[in-house]
Image (cartoon, rainbow, N blue to C red):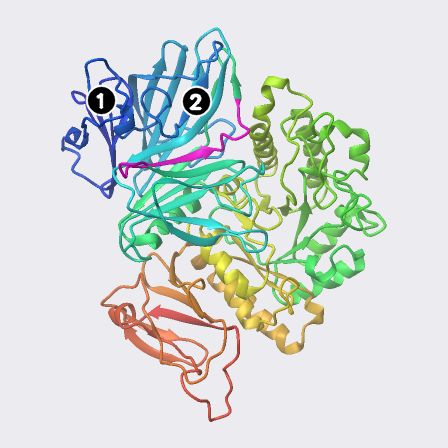
Amino acid sequence: MITVNEKEKVFHLNNGRISYLFYVMESGQLGHLYFGKALNPEGSYLHMVEKAHRPMTTYINEGDLYTSYEHLRQEYPSYGTSDYRYPALEIQGGDGSRICKPEYKGYEIIKGKKALQGLPATYTEDEAEADTLEITMRDEWRNLEIIFSYSIFRDVDAVARSVKYINCGKEDLLINRAMSMSIDMPDGDYQSVQLSGAWARERSVKIRDLEPGITAVSSMRGNSSHQHNPFIALKRRDTTEQRGDAYGFSLIYSGNFLAQAEVDNYNVLRVMLGINPFGFQWKLEPEDAFTTPEAIMVYSKEGLNGMSLQFHRLYRQRLARGYWRDRERPVLINNWEATQFDYVEEDLIKFAKKAKECGIELFVLDDGWFGSRNNDKSGLGDWKANREKLPNGIEGLSEKIEELGMKFGLWFEPEMVNKDSDFYRSHPDYILQTPGRSASHGRNQFVLDFSRKEVVDAIYEQMHELLTNAKISYIKWDMNRSISECYSASYEADRQGEIFHRYILGVYDLHERLIQAFPKLLIESCSSGGGRFDAGMLYYAPQGWVSDDSDAVERLKIQYGTSFVYPLSSMGAHVSACPNEQVGRITPIETRGNVACTGAFGYELDLNKLSEVEIEIVKKQVAFYKENRGFLAKGDFYRLLSPFEGNFAAWEVVNPEGSKALITVTRMLSEINGPYRRLPLRGLIENRKYHIQSKFLSYDAYGDELMEYGLMLEDKSSGQIIDGSGGCKDFLSVMYEITAK
C-alpha cells in the first residue's frame, strides 16, 4: 500500500481506492502533491509541483526567483523562511529564535501500526490491515529530530497521521505549536462543514463557503467542548450526502484543539488540525520526546455520507476496543430523571424491579449516592457511599440488584471536587488554581489537577476499592464544567503551558488503569452530556452520552450531526420522561423509542409512573431493540432527510449484506392535506426483492425501486382523514422494517 520512487523521492500511499502523495523538495523539506481518489501507483507525479515568479515574494535561494515556500504546497510547514501563512510547527531555542528548518534524512515502512504512548489512537489487530510510513527529519541547528508517521488502512479509506519531536541536543527547546496534520490543497473552492452548538444542542451541522482568510473551530476550555467538535470536513459546493468529493479531518483528542482552513490570495487551501496553540507550550528537555495526538484524514467520492461510513467503520472497529467493542450493549435505565438526589435504597429497589419486568438489563445509579451529596454543593471527591441513603453501601445495593437478575452501574465524576468534602479539606492544593487569583466554580465544583500523578492516584484508589468490593458492571463518567484558572502548583513557571495537555493525559491514564484492572467494565463517557464527545474518549469508553437534552425531537438534530463522524454504537440514546424537562415538549413514547433505538439504548424515567399501556409499549421497545441491537450497532448508517432542512427527519441502517434495513422517519409538525411522499433508500441490492413492513403498511418491492422511486411513506396527513382513524399528530415517528425475500 506504500510505494516509494527513490529517484524522485515521491511517497505514494494507496489502498486501491484513495491515494496520498508527497515528496521531498530540493531543500529537504516535504511538499504535498495529492490526496483523493486512487491514482496509478506506477505514475510519476512531480509535474504536479507548480512554480512561478510572483512579485512581492520572498525566495529561498539567492539567484532563484521561482522557489518560495509561500507558493509551494507543503506537507508540514514552518513560518519565517519565506512562508507567511500559519505554520504547523513553531520551535523556540535558547537564543529566542523561532525558525525551524527540518530536512529529510530517511524513511521506514512498517507493517501494521504503532501505538502512541499515553495517547488514544487507531490500531491494527493484524499487520496486514495497514502500512505505516515513518519519515525522519532533522533540524541540525536545533539538534531536533522530527518523525512524521503516516498509516494507510487496507479496508478503510483513511490516513492516520501523527508527529513525534525528539530533542537530540543539550539545551532545552520550547514547542509553541505542534499540529497533528497539515495539508496544502490546490484550490479553496470548497465549503466547510463543522459540528457546533452548546450544552443540550451539541453538534449542529454548520456549512459555509470558504473565502480568502481563516475558517476555524476550536476549544480553549480544557475539553473538546459542547461548542465545537474536533472535526472539520470539506466538500465541493455540488457535493451531496450521496455523491461528490468530501474530505473529513478528525482529531483523536479530548482537550483544547484547533481545526483551521486557510485560503491564501492565490486560492490555495491549507488545512490544519491539532492541539490548540493558544495557551500551549511544551518544554522539551534533552533526550525527551513529545508526540502529537493522532489525526484521521478521510476521502470519499460518495459524498458526506460516504465520508461518514469510513469514519464509522474505522472508529467502531479499530478505535473502540476491549471487551465491549463487538458485544451487544445492555439495555439500561438511569434513575436521574426519576429521582435526582432524592432517594433511599428502597426506592431504588422498587425502581429496578419494575425495570426488570420490562426486560431492562442494567440499572444505573446516578448522582447523589456518595459522601454528603444531597445537592450539587457537596460531596464530590468523597467516593464512599452515603449510608443514610444506602445503609448497606454500594456493595449491598449492587448485590440486591444482581439478585433481581440485572447488572448494576454507578455514576462518577472523578475529575471534580466540591470544597464541602473531606477530600478537599485534606488536599486543598489538589485543584487547578492560579496563585493570587480566585478560582471560578461551575456547578459549585472545582477541577482536580489531573496533571499531577498523586491526584490521579488518589482518585484511582477510591474507585478501585469500590469496583473491587462491589458488583459494578458499568460506570457513567461525568464532567460537568470546563477548566478555568489553569495552573498547577506542581510545575515550574516555564511549564505552565503544558498543563492543559498534561491534564488530558491524566484523564487518559485513569481510564487506562481502570480498564486494565477491570477489563469487562463498560465505561460510558459523559461531560454534561456531549461536552467531551470525541474520538479520544471513544478509545477508552465505547459509548458516550450524546447530550443532556433527552427530548427525542431535539435529539434528531443532535444524533444526526453526531453521525457525521461517530458510529451508532458510540451514541448513548435514551427514552426520557415526558413532558421533557428541558423543553417541556410532550412527545409520543413511540417516537422517543424510535429515535433512541438507533444508539446504545436505555431509559431515563420512572417506570412506576407510566400507564399499563405505556408499560406494554416499553416492553415491546426493549424486545425490539434486543432483537436488532447487533444489527443496529454494526450496520451501515445513511442519513436520508435532514432535520436541519425541513419538517421531516429520516435515517436508515442496513446490514453489510444488504439483506435487512431499518428506516426511521419522523415528522416534526402535523400537516393537513399534504402531498404523497416517497423516500429513496440506500445500500440495498438492486435486483433483490424485499418485503416492507411498518405499523400500517405492507408490500413487496425490488431494491432498485426502493432506491430510485423510493419507499412509499404511510403518512395520513396526505389528504383529509375522514374515517376517524386519527394519526395526524405532532412529532410522529414511523419505523419501517425491510427484509430480503
| Residue 271, magenta (yes or no) | yes
Q: Which residue is mark 1?
A: 67
Q: CA distance from mark 1 to mark 2?
A: 22 Å
Give the quarter of the figure containing the C terminus. bottom left
Left or right for 614, reference 657: right
Q: Position of residue 10 (x, y in %)?
A: 21, 26
Q: Which residues are magenta?
A: 264-281
Amino acid at circle 1: Thr
- Regarding mark 1 in the picture, which secondary structure is present there? loop
Can you say whether 32 is above or below 571 in the image? Answer: above
Amino acid at circle 2: Glu
- Which residue occupies the foreground of this view, 626 or 646? 646
Quadrant of the rendered structure where residue 80 is? Answer: top left
Can you say whether 69 is above or below 710 in the image? Answer: above
| Residue 153, magenta (yes or no) | no
The residue at 46%/62% (across/down) is 628
Residue 692 visible from this viewpoint: yes
Q: Residue furthest bottom?
A: 723
Answer few, some or many: residues within 10 Å of disc 2's Cα (few below 14, many 20 plus, some between 14 and 19). many
